[in-house]
């Protein structure tokens, strides 16, 4: 039976070099940006899944450049893992279209891509054990390491200033002033928190750190953990792979992989930076990234966690005030709830920052 979906996945699948018969498509995953589907195809009597995505072109204004980046990066990574056991589970593999391209541009103006579906692995929305944190950080560090010899200049900046925190702050101030949907009155404490902590914004830009090829969206559910071994088998969600700072990636790991809660937890008493998770992240990340990071980058690992958590909190708050135009929301106030968890986590990190710094120094 074909599931009812917003898009005609049977027609989309027909545009790609996939043999066999369309069986079914279902919406998949919990991403905030793209529309993702698991599509089952009957190939010779066996159901094989493929991962299809409609790129959100309201957010990604340059889908062609974005796909060029992904092609470059997956090709580079593919060469590096060739010969490893189950290489096709270790790096995303694009399925070409019938015309031989990396994406399909449909009549409605949508951009579609298809990947080999990585079976026997999953992305989690909340961390449960330090072993998971270790596995995720090891994988993201390896990702950066394998791309260290790809010149950053060979990738296009598909969302300019994506992690420019002072500009994110300025965007919030502008939104507060405009207050287009009359929500400022609903977010007074969060706005005050943001204004009080503005000083965090400049911390990484002022440090003059090296530009590298980075992922820029290393949230915990963007690495697939192997169901059997627990290994961080594949880094996914490559839309924002661009020139950036290594610390943005580590910072987003701290943001998403230290609290036992999901990003939209309502019980703020449960939201906290758990030290054993941070230790696992630092050890995992440094196990694969220490050889190319500078001393200054290593020193700033804990601060990066605070900065990125603050930055994403600013973005959720801005989007709440804008009327929920960027992130997918599933309930009223969803973006404000997300903002609150981020700011709670910023406080928790700040309380433990000295100990986090000590730990990193000792590794
Ligand atoms: P978004 O940008 O919307 O977050 P993602 O690229 O992260 O989209 O994909 C959404 C979800 O789909 C992921 O969290 C993951 O669970 C799943 N996913 C993505 N790519 C694959 C793949 N190649 N194989 C299996 N699952 C995948
Ligand atoms: C978005 O695509 P997804 O859901 O992995 C966002 C990230 C945010 C994250 C917050 C392109 O990531 O920047 O950190 O939500 N991606 C984009 O959960 O804006
Ligand atoms: Mg994702």
Image (cartoon, rainbow, N blue to C red):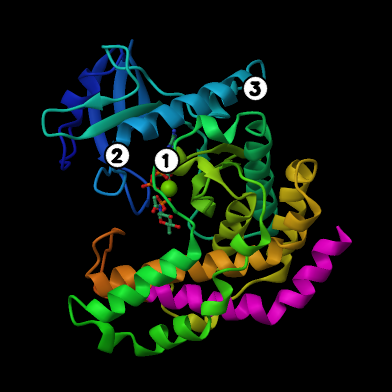
Give whichever of discs 2 and 1 has the lower sequence position: 2
Cβ atoms under marks 2 and 1 closer than 8 Å: yes
Work out whether residue 322 or residue 124 is closer to the camera in this orientation and state it.
Answer: 322
* Percent position of residue 46, x then y: 36, 18
153 relative to 82, above or below = below
295 relative to 292, above or below = below
Q: Residues within 10 Å of mark 1 (few under 14, many from 20)?
A: some
**Residue 284 painted magenta:** no
Residue at x 66% of width, y 29% of height: 149
Q: Read off the residue under disc 1.
A: 239
129 relative to 97, above or below = below
Q: Residues within 10 Å of mark 2 (few under 14, many from 20)?
A: many
On whether ligand 2 comes within 8 Å of the CB at mark 1, the answer is: yes
Question: Is residue 271 visible from the viewing direction of this image?
Answer: no
**Residue 360 painted magenta:** yes
User: Which residue range is magenta in the image?
Assistant: 337-363
Q: Secondary structure at mark 2?
A: strand
Q: Secondary structure at mark 3?
A: helix
Q: Read off the residue under disc 3.
A: 80
Total tally of numbered discs in the picture = 3
On whether ligand 1 comes within 8 Å of the CB at mark 3, the answer is: no
Q: Read off the residue under disc 2.
A: 55
Q: Secondary structure at mark 1?
A: helix
Q: Which image quarter holds the C terminus? A: bottom right
Left or right, 194 with respect to 89, comes to left
Residue at x 60% of width, y 70% of height: 306
Q: Which image quarter holds the N terminus? A: top left
């Amino acid at each position: 039976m074909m599931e009812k979906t917003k898009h005609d996945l049977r027609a989309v699948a027909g545009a790609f070099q996939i043999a066999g018969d369309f069986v079914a498509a279902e919406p998949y995953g919990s991403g905030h940006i793209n529309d993702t589907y698991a599509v089952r195809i009957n190939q010779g009597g066996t159901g094989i899944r493929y991962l299809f995505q409609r790129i959100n072109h309201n957010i990604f204004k340059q889908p062609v450049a974005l796909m060029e980046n992904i092609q470059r990066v997956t090709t580079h990574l593919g060469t590096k893992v060739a010969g490893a056991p189950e290489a096709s589970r270790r790096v995303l593999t694009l399925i070409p279209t019938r015309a031989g391209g990396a994406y399909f541009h449909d009549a409605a103006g949508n951009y579609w891509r298809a990947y080999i579906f990585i079976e026997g692995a999953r992305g989690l929305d909340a961390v449960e054990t330090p072993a998971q944190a270790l596995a995720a950080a090891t994988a993201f560090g390896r990702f950066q390491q394998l791309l260290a010899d790809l010149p950053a200049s060979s990738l296009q900046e598909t969302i300019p200033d994506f992690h420019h925190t002072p500009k994110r702050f300025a965007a919030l101030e502008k939104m507060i002033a405009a207050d287009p949907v009359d929500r400022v009155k609903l977010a007074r404490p969060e706005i005050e928190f943001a204004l009080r902590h503005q000083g965090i914004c400049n911390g990484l830009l002022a440090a003059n750190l090296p530009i590298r090829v980075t992922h820029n969206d290393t949230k915990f559910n963007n690495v697939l953990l192997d169901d059997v071994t627990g290994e961080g088998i594949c880094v996914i969600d490559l839309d924002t792979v661009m020139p950036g700072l290594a610390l943005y990636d580590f910072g987003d790991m701290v943001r998403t992989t230290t609290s036992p809660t999901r990003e939209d937890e309502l019980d703020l008493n449960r939201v906290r930076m758990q030290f054993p998770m941070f230790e696992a992240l630092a050890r995992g990340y440094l196990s694969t990234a220490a050889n190319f990071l500078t001393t200054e980058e290593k020193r700033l690992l804990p601060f990066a966690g605070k900065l990125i958590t603050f930055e994403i909190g600013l973005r959720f708050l801005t989007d709440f005030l804008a009327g929920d135009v960027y992130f997918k929301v599933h309930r009223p106030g969803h973006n404000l709830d997300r903002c609150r968890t981020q700011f709670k986590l910023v406080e928790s990190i700040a309380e433990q920052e000295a100990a986090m710094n000590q730990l990193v120094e000792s590794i």
